[in-house]
Amino acid sequence: MRAIINGTVYTMAGEIIEAGTVLIEGGKIIAVGAHLALPADTEIIEAKDKFVLPGIIDAHTHIGVYEEGVGFEGADGNEMTNPATPQVRALDAINPMEPGFKGAVAGGVTSLTVAPGSGNVIGGQAVAIKTWGQVVDDMVIREPLGLKIAFGENPKRVYSGQKKSPGTRMATAAILRENLVAARNYLAKLEKGKADPEKAPDRDLKMEILAKVLTREIPLRAHAHRADDIITAIRIAEEFTVDICIEHCTEGHLIADYLAEKGVPAIVGPTLGSRSKVELVNTSFKTAAILHKAGVKVALTSDHPVFPVWQLPIAAALAHKQGLPEEEALKAITINAAEIDGIADRVGSIEVGKDADLVIFSGHPFAWKTRVEKTLINGEIVYER
């Protein structure tokens, strides 16, 4: 049994506990509060004058599928040989021993989503994992987490260069629709096969994952920067009655009321990155604040390796500086990210029964001098300064 004591505990569940205690056993949080009585054999971690938060969560990364400093050999995020590759899985390409993971735990990031890239209209399956381990299967929190799709200039650029479709936004939308219709037909054949096995279709890995989208077991995770692309993504989601999350959402602040009306969450960023292409001309740290004010649930992303995942609290601090309330800025990298990713039953807040993924900061996470003192994943100290 292990206890973190005397810290300022930000539970991200509605309360801040001064001189708080977090009690851990078996990798889980078993008690949270002030002045808790502890068993005599409890291992004590002193956190006086420090801040204790749930582990930071990045809701959208490519860590492990784009390895830092490697180049071609470590570039496994985009299977750009067909514009629709729903059957590929980020899980099968993650190298948990690449340096990005060490940076993550040193920066207090304990969970994140790894997704395929945005070169294809349908890029493949995303996965939520912990940031510590040698065997990626043991790090998985949820798989598949969602199906990555992409709008805008990336699929156009990739396939125009190959003299293939899509060469326009029209074709991008059409390819997505065609695949969703094919999955509807596949589901219908599966249903017929229940009564007559001879009518059952052959197993189809592409259709299986698209069927999970249609039955709302997993959402579409839509790469979309421009307002028009965001609207197209939502239009298609509504046509097929499927769940969707907008990722990047660079111009979300221009249509904040629309997103709120549709009840669509947004993963905003990577705002620390440069305006490296036309779609990023309206990048602003005000986006998250405007979306939150409109009623949109917001998380933030580093889009690692666009900027290093360990810098995510800096992005949150800058969003706070531009109008996002402090608590909401912290939620955007903890509980909101967990809820959007569908993993909030395990991570994202300091509550009894959740995984003991915790970070001890030397000061407030938004203070520029603050350092990560300790990172715990499943109750184990995986980083100590």
Image (cartoon, grey):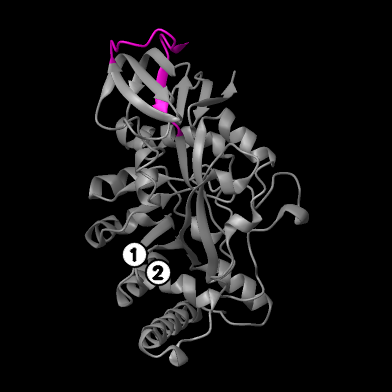
Badge 1, how many Cα within 10 Å: few under 14, some, many 20+? many
Q: Is residue 206 left or right of residue 26?
A: right
Residue hosting label 2: 213
For the N terminus, the quadrant is top left
Q: Is residue 322 visible?
A: no
Task: Tell me what residue is drawn at x 35 percent, y 71 percent.
Answer: 215
Task: Indicate which label's residue lies in the foreground, 1 or 2.
Answer: 2
Residue hosting label 1: 243
Q: Where does the image place residue 314, in percent across and percent down from the top left?
A: 48, 32
Secondary element at tag 1: loop
* Residue nearer the viewer, 207 or 56: 207
Q: Is residue 167 above or below residue 326?
A: below
Task: Tell me what residue is drawn at x 40 percent, y 56 percent.
Answer: 251
Q: Are marks 1 and 2 in contact (CB under 8 Å)?
A: yes
For the C terminus, the quadrant is top right
How many marks on residues? Answer: 2
Q: Is residue 246 above or below residue 202?
A: above
Amino acid bearing label 1: Asp
* Residue nearer the viewer, 32 or 303: 32
Task: Tell me what residue is drawn at x 58 percent, y 24 percent.
Answer: 383
Q: Is residue 202 left or right of residue 33?
A: right
**Is residue 148 found inside the magenta-colored segment of the image?**
no
Q: Where does the image place residue 44, in percent across and percent down from the top left?
A: 45, 11
Amino acid bearing label 2: Val
Q: Is residue 61 visible?
A: yes
Task: Tell me what residue is drawn at x 24 percent, y 50 percent.
Answer: 294
Magenta stretch, residue numbers: 34-55
What's the distance in space between the residues labelled 1 and 2, CA to CA? 8 Å
Badge 2, how many Cα within 10 Å: few under 14, some, many 20+? many
In the rendered image, which quarter is residue 333 located in? Answer: top left
